[in-house]
Image: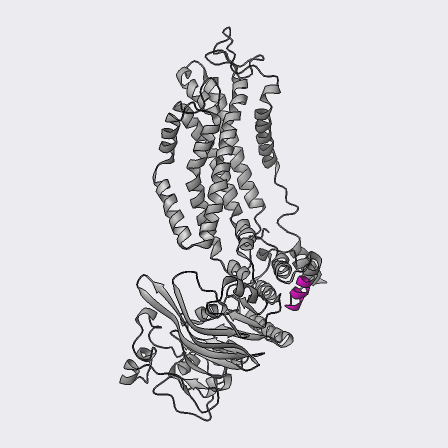
Amino acid sequence: MSDQIIEQAMLRPAPEKGKSLGPLFWTCVGWLALNVLAAIFANVLPLHDPLFGDFNAINAGPSMHHLFGTDDLGRDIFSRVVYGSRISIAVGVGSIVIGFAVGAPLGMLAAYRRGRFDSILTNFMYILLAFPAIVAVIAVLSFWTPRSMFKIIVVIGLASIPIVYRVIRTATLAVASKDYVVAAKVQGATDRRIMMKELLPNIAPIGISFVLIGIATVVTLEGALAFLGLSVNPPTPSWGNMINEARTVLGQNNGLVFFPSLFLCLFLLCLNFIGDRLRSHYDVTEVKL
Amino acid sequence: MSADQLLVVEDLSTTFATPRGPLPAVGNVSFTLDKNETLGIVGESGSGKTVLARTIMGLQPRMNVTVTGSALLNGRQMVGASEEEKRSVWGTEVAMVFQDPMTSLNPVMRIGKQIDETLRVRLGMDNRAARDRAIELLEMVGIPSPAHRYRAFPGQLSGGMRQRVVIATALACSPQLLMADEPTTGLDVTIQAQILNLLDDLKERLHMSVVLITHDLGVVATRTSRIVVMYAGRIVEIGSTRDVFHHHRMPYTRALLESSPKVTSPSHTRLTTIPGRPPNLMELPAGCSFAPRCAHATARCASERPELVAADNPGHAYACWNPLPVRRHQHLEAS
């Protein structure tokens, strides 16, 4: 009898059941979904033309007609923020996808196989890492004109490969030397199976955290490039180049710097919060009491 | 090689190449293991026990290691075997239980799946059959309510339970030889006995041979038929458990035995320790490796390495220039 009670008590707190992710988590997911949907459907939404200057309302404050007000050329800030998210989100996600598509498999393979393949590749990546990525990105983008979103994604994506490689390789190294990997090996598992079933699930939490941090970093990097005038050409808006342009009218028009910064900030905060919450929620390595 | 010999190790040496020179971790080891036999390998930390076991398994690192000699498992050469050959033997003919159950299970995979995996891949079972067999195995190793536990993650089990799961995983494909590398070192003393009894029991039921590696003589005393004593990568004494415990000739074996507590000695008796430290394998003395720590050492011990010589009883051999006298009635009971 008491055995049964203990048994049931012990089996109940299965980490993946029962506990909800919490309202804040779903708020963040909702906000991100809203951002992404708005970015995708910006041209079918009832928005002002982000490039149209209404010279009757320059540097206007928020009103019913212009929700966030207008900028120094009379363009609607709300619509520019929504259109700007297209560039920012696409650059953030796109370049991290490139970085992971190349860097992560190489990192895992190098850490698992070791030997000459690993030492050559790792040294090569470390040489690349020795150059400050931002300087390289600036240099390439300065000469590769005309600049487009696609080119920016490719350049930042390539620059992120060595960083992703290093993180994933280190994470894999830590896992690959564990006894359970050797145990799987001596049960006759193939290398492919070991990589997919033993290594990948164990480095996934680190990988996902790094994806989220990476997206946040790239969105700000795009902002920094825009600040230097090296991102997409104006008048196409992005969060970064809006903040850049707002610099010149900072005293007269606070909304112009405030709203894109707010959206950038919330986007990054939500990403990080979701990543953190997911990691702790699906962590089965610790018993939660 | 006779029909009932499962494992024949001959003149096996493993040398690691390090930046500071070669490191002979295992030197000229030879022994045999019969079917349904339990062999104990004992020695201090760093005496080469684990490297020996891994060499026999064919689990050396890919680089910087030289293995010479031969290890025949069921007549199949494990030294220099290709990855494919080894993979076909691993799991089905030889399996391994590791020292620390905390790290030998994948923390993000349900324990049932970890057993399943092997069954499906190696024996080609379908999902249902594999699941049923996995639950059967969990029951066999004494996991209560195995059907529920099948879905548990390793983090939800205690150390002893995890080691049982590790054993169940190792036994999934009914290996003929089980290598247990210090299977109880990471566990509480009370659990140690349970796990060892379980191994013993399974060995009888499944007609396996077991190689039990340990630094604890108490572990091997009642559960092995023969014992190999290793020091600095070499066998210094080998023989039946009875011979090693009661008629040992090598001073190192005696020192090991005297350094473990005995129930018969009065309380507060100071344990005898072995002075000094295990030698640095990179700077082994020319003679007997144990000579610097040995009370019986002579000039010859320092200059000339003793080889294994046969003692009175069959199968008993020791490597020593000044062996201890044969004592007929020695009362060193196993603790």
- Which residue is at a point 52% across and 42% down the rendered structure image? A208
Name above or below for residue A81 compared with residue B165: above
Q: Looking at this view, name the residue that lies furthest to the right.
A: A1
Closest to the observer: A289 or A238?
A238
Tell me: A126 left or right of B266: left
Name above or below for residue A54 compared with residue A162: above
The image's colouring method is one colour
Q: Is residue B261 visible?
A: no
Closest to the observer: B124 or B285?
B124
Image spot of residue A169 (x, y percent): 45, 48
Residue B141 is inside the magenta segment: yes
- Count up the numbered dots: 0
Closest to the observer: B218 or B249?
B249
Give the prevailing secondary structure in the magenta stretch: helix
Image spot of residue A155 (x, y percent): 43, 32
Q: Is residue B49 visible?
A: yes
- Which residue is at a point 55% across and 57% down the rendered structure image? A190
Name above or below for residue B241 compared with residue B159: below
Closest to the observer: A113 or B239?
A113
Q: Which residues are magenta?
A: B133-142
